Amino acid sequence: MLCGDCIAQFAAPAPRCERCGERTGSATPACGTCLADPPPFDACRVACDYGFPWDRLIGEFKFGSHVELAMALAGLMLRALRASQVERPDGVLPIPLAPRRLAERGYNQAWELARRVARGLDCPARAEVLQRPLEGAYQAELTLAQRRAAMRGAFIVAPAQRSWVVGRRLALVDDAMTSGEPLREAAASLRRAGASRIEAWVLARTPSPTAVG
């Protein structure tokens, strides 16, 4: 479904900060931003920048009910994860949707990616660990400050899953990363519950205005 030429041109490996996934001049364990304000996850793996042609494909996948795109987009993530030689985690978790948003959309795009990526890496996918009980405004409609405020306390570890989380190495999957607040808040919840290592696995990351590349 995705041709090799598009992947080679628009999803070529790029040097990034290993901590937050931002493009950098050369690969680095932590960029200046992460040194000043480390995210609650230990690493971030990014398949591509959020731009042509992936922005349109992700939009169709996420908002256009084209769930069939999940296989091809998960394949793009698997390609990047294998190239970075990630260690298999104990569980792959999607960023959850609030109940009303899930009912409106009919599926959680992060789960559609997470379960396919987990299958490709031969590790378990767990949709029941994290919950998002509260509704919120669409992130795209908010400023960065508003996104941070809206995300505070948005995610919880399901009470029945707390003992399972303790000491586990986990990967959080989301389709797109702009502010990074959903991933930060979800990782913080898992960290408080006792997870030993948390990685963010993202299909596409929106480059900051100062990003190299």
Image (tube, rainbow, N blue to C red):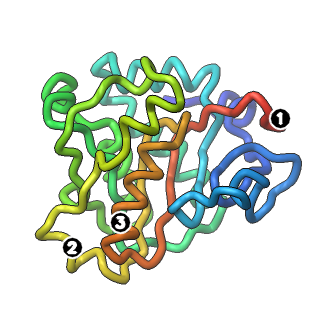
Image point (66%, 62%), residue name:
84
Could you classify mark 2 by the number of other residues whose Cα lies within 10 Å: few (under 14), some (14-19), or many (20 or more)?
A: some
Front-most of residues 6 and 158 = 158
Q: Toward which corner of the image does residue 189 lie, by quadrant?
A: bottom left
Count of numbered tags: 3
In the displayed structure, 131 sits above or below 51; it is below
Which numbered dot is residue 86?
none
Identify which amino acid the numbered label 3 is placed on: Leu
Q: What distance separates the C-alpha of mark 1 from that of mark 2?
A: 41 Å
Q: Badge 1 is on which residue?
A: 213
Circles 1 and 3: CB atoms closer than 8 Å: no
Q: In this view, does 178 lie to the left or right of 119?
A: right
- Residue 37 in percent (x, y) is at 65, 56
Identify which amino acid the numbered label 1 is placed on: Gly
Front-most of residues 58 and 208 = 208
Q: Is residue 19 left or right of residue 115?
A: right
Which numbered dot is residue 190?
3
Q: Badge 2 is on which residue?
A: 162
Identify which amino acid the numbered label 2 is placed on: Arg
